[in-house]
Amino acid sequence: MKKRILLGFGLLLLIFLAGSFIAVLYITKTSDRMDRLVLLHQVEILREDLIIRIQQVQAHIYRGRIRDSGDIDVLISQVQEMDRTMDSCVGCHHSPELAQGLVSMRDMANDYKMAISHLITASANPSRIVGLERRAQDLGQELVTMTQGMAFTANARLQQKTQETMDTIREVRWVLSVTLLLGLVLAFIIAYALVRGLDQRLQQLLEVTRRIARGELQHRVKITDARGSEFTELGEAFNTMTENLHVSQRQLIQSAKLAAIGELATNIAYEVNNPLAGVLGYTSLLLKADDIPADKKEYLRIVERETLHAREILKNLLDFSRRKPPRLVKTDISLVVRDTVPIIQGQAALNNVVITTSFEGSLPQVAIDVDELRQVFVHLVNNACLAMPKGGSLDIRCRTEQDMAGRRSVTVEFADTGHGIPEEYLDKIFDPFFSARPDGGGTGLGLSISYLIVQNHGGRIDVESSVDKGSVFKVIIPVQDVKGDG
Amino acid sequence: MLLILPFLHACTNEKPQPSVPKGYAQQEILIGLIPEQNVFRQRERYGVLKQYLADRLGVTITFTSLSGYGNIVKRFSNEKLDGAFFGSFSYALAHQQIGVESIARPINLDGTSTYRGYLFVRRDSRILGASDMRGRRFAFVERATSAGYLFPLAYFRTHHVDNLSVYLGETFFAGSHDAAILAVLNRDADVGAAKSTIYDQMEKEDPRIGKELQILAASDEFPENCLAVRKDLDPKLKTALRQALLDMGKDNEGAAVLKKFGARGFVETTDGDFASVYRLTGQAGIDMTTYLYNNR
């Protein structure tokens, strides 16, 4: 999600940058056009100024006092102003047509200045002076006409440029409006997608949390995000937590159930054991009696055998209920597995079951009661063999695992290819006296005892099973720091 | 140490202080310019000099253009000009009539500080001497110029022509040397007189002059237009003005101004330098104390 948010913000930034770029581009374009327009207006002002300057000089000449000493300096300054204005005009960049016109205008201005100079300095022959005066006036008028003509051309160009600039401004307004609108729409879409994505996931989490709160611990968060995303991690953590909660709850129920059954069994065993001792004693006596016919004694032997069987059951029950605390020793559990396999290899071979073992890396040492764990393993292998009456394979794998809280454990996994356990039995298989075997064989205490043993080691047994595909029993023993051997 | 100080000022980039103390009797100098060439070009040329001298002297310099050579003498009296760049003849007139004192004159780029008077015609005019000028149109410059009037007057006197108004068909005063040259070039006149420096400069700028005009006679050398001041100008200011002009080539700023002005430097000028002018006035039969310079 973080990536998505970052991506969203990145996109928004890109849209913003693109919008800004377009805006700057168009504003620059517009301002360039405006600059050109302002320049043209300035040039226009220059031209008007030039016309005024020339007309001032002309007026001076027309006044006819041009050779009066005081007026010469005034006229010279006026001509110099005219010259400076013309230099400004020529200095601007122009179209080739105007540039050529300006060159002609400059030449004419030089002739005009020359004529004025001659007029100023002419000091004899009144008729010649009149001629010089007329020539200066004519050149001045021609210069004014030429400047006005250029001003007319420039005015037409100015109008055209003004129109072009106005068109550009309209275009810029349109483009900027569209850019702004598009940017807003895109920003809204991105923001909506982000919020919706966030909201969907939170709603799902909230819904699952509510279900969990209602006790529906089998519910899990459906993870749709890519691996590594925050919601995937959160969902996985949440699911692990729920799984652990579910397991703990099951263990709690199982423990309570076992405790209740154990207490009941103990009471029953005590109560039943004494009458059974009587029954067994008198049966033995009757079997020793000579006056009982052989066929009757056969009945007595059946009574004795079944009573012994009942006593065996009671003994198991008492063993079950009087479990002693395990004698923990730090051991490599793989050694226990390696020791156990040969014991059961023969039995497995008889059932056409192939046992394979695998050990992932070096396992950490765990505190276990070796005898009790071996008993658990033997029982699980036996169970697996029974689940594969037509043979199959049993894969025993040892590995180290670590949960999300960083707690390590050693897992010994027994994966068979047997008939599997129906889902409705999965919650009951650890109950005392429960047996899924069709013949109802066994005491139904093996898994219960195994469960208790592992529980006493602080561990648990997890089962995953699929009918006709097989079952996986996982014995999970936590790795704990145990000081000493007891 | 005091002896070394003046040398330290020479040829440095630093702006030299005015060579004479300030505190002049006047804070503004009005200098007239005679229209020896295009008045606008002349104003540009002298404009660069104006600021330089103002900075050096610490006084305001104002140039004023005159419509005719002769006016200089008149304006010295009427408008209290402090100085003017005189033509050689107009200086001689002013010196004789109102006692102006020459200070300095520019040294041309070719190293000379003198000029000659030219008499010139169109090559196609078939005029080869004074005798061919009878009844022809003549373009003088001004009645108060050496090259533009004094020299042709003396030339005609030497060729025994005393009454020009009868001998020549039409005469007029073009007002400036370039105007006189252009008048002949443009067939407004058949013969013209002008100073050599202007003629040579225009010949470089306009190839038609070398191609279409021909110089018939040249005068002796006259001093270039000199700056002369009124005789009662504050002596301290006069000295400072002369020194500023003479020292112009000694610092970078002055050298730059000279380059724009179109001169190598300035040379001190005294009345003795105008001997050739005085000699020519004698040849022309002019009495400068009574000479009427107004053109007619």
Image: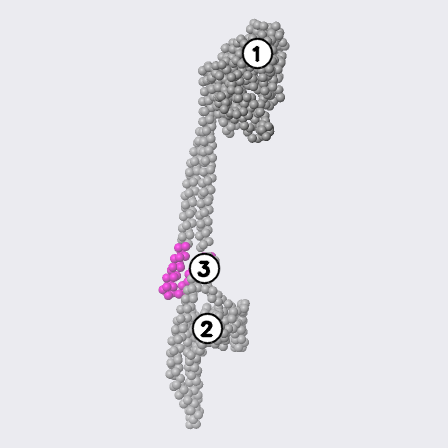
Callout 3 amino acid: Glu
Residue for point 52% across, 15% down: B72
Q: Residue under mark 1: which chain is it in?
A: B
State the extent of the magenta-drawn residues as a range: A198-226
Instruction: Give the mark toward the camera: 2 or 3.
Output: 2
Figure quadrant of the N terminus of chain A: bottom left
Residue for point 45% across, 24% down: A48
Task: Relative to A276, say whether B175 is above or below.
Answer: above
Image position, residue A363 (x, y; %): 52, 69
Q: Specify the label residue A457 is tagged with.
A: 2
Instruction: Please say if the residues under marks 2 and 3 sit with CB atoms less than 8 Å apart.
Output: no
Helix, strand or loop under label 3: helix
**Residue with the most extreme left position:** A214
- The CA distance from mark 1 to mark 3 is 113 Å
Residue B249, quarter of picture: top right
Helix, strand or loop under label 2: loop
Q: Which residue is mark 3?
A: A233
Front in this rendered view, residue A92 or B180: B180
